[in-house]
Amino acid sequence: MTNNEYDLIVIGAGSTAAGNAAGLGKRVALIERDKLGGTCLNYGCDPTKTLLHTASVLYHARHASALGLCIPQAEADWVAEWSASLWPWKSFRFIWQLTMKKQSVLKDVWQK
Ligand SMILES: Cc1cc2nc3c(=O)[nH]c(=O)nc-3n(C[C@H](O)[C@H](O)[C@H](O)COP(=O)(O)OP(=O)(O)OC[C@H]3O[C@@H](n4cnc5c(N)ncnc54)[C@H](O)[C@@H]3O)c2cc1C
């Protein structure tokens, strides 16, 4: 990295600061130690809501008799659920990555 190569260096790829700055024509370097997308995309908002929805479906399946439905064994396989729920975040991360790339941020991303 030579002097004056960047207008801004953003540490952490969670917020849209890097994208916004790049959108304003700034030369941005983005440094991330874990996963692109930060807490919200990878651990917080989105995965949490997937788990809540899964729990809600399980609850309704177990109480389906109230609606005249017979679902004899509604069980949770959380390991399978969790691995199945991983693919959307991978896709979102990929889309996020493309967006950043389009804004010329990702040519210089440092990521694990
Ligand atoms: C369980 C849970 C549920 C949530 N649900 C919601 C919700 O429904 N709605 C909502 O609005 N908000 C929700 N949030 C809050 C939301 O996730 C945060 O407000 C948001 O992620 C903050 O964004 P950020 O960019 O400031 O930080 P982060 O998303 O945490 O991003 C920071 C990034 O910086 C990286 N980093 C940190 N230090 C360094 C370093 N030294 N070098 C390199 N990289 C570094 C981290 O790895 C991380 O990727 C939830 C949070 C949690 C935990």
Image: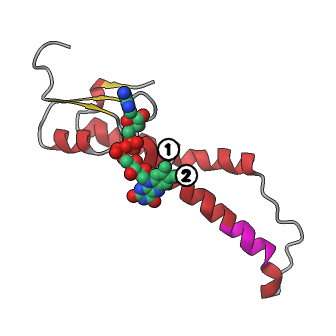
Q: Is residue 2 above or below residue 107?
A: above
Q: Tell me if the residue at label 2 has its CB under 8 Å from ligand 1.
A: yes
Q: Tell me if the residue at label 1 has its CB under 8 Å from ligand 1.
A: yes
Residue lying at 66% horizontally and 68% vertically, measured from the top left: 56
**Label total for image:** 2
Quick one: label 1, few (<14), some, or many (20+) residues within 10 Å? Answer: many
Q: Position of residue 1 (x, y in %)?
A: 21, 14
**Magenta residues, start to end:** 56-63
Please tell me the numbered disc located at residue 42.
Answer: 1
Quarter location, residue 55: bottom right
Q: Position of residue 102 (x, y in %)?
A: 26, 39
Residue at the extreme right of the image, as rendered: 72
Quarter location, residue 37: top left
Q: Which residue is mark 2?
A: 47
Describe the element under mark 1 as helix, strand or loop: helix
Describe the element under mark 2 as helix, strand or loop: helix
Overall secondary structure of the magenta section: helix
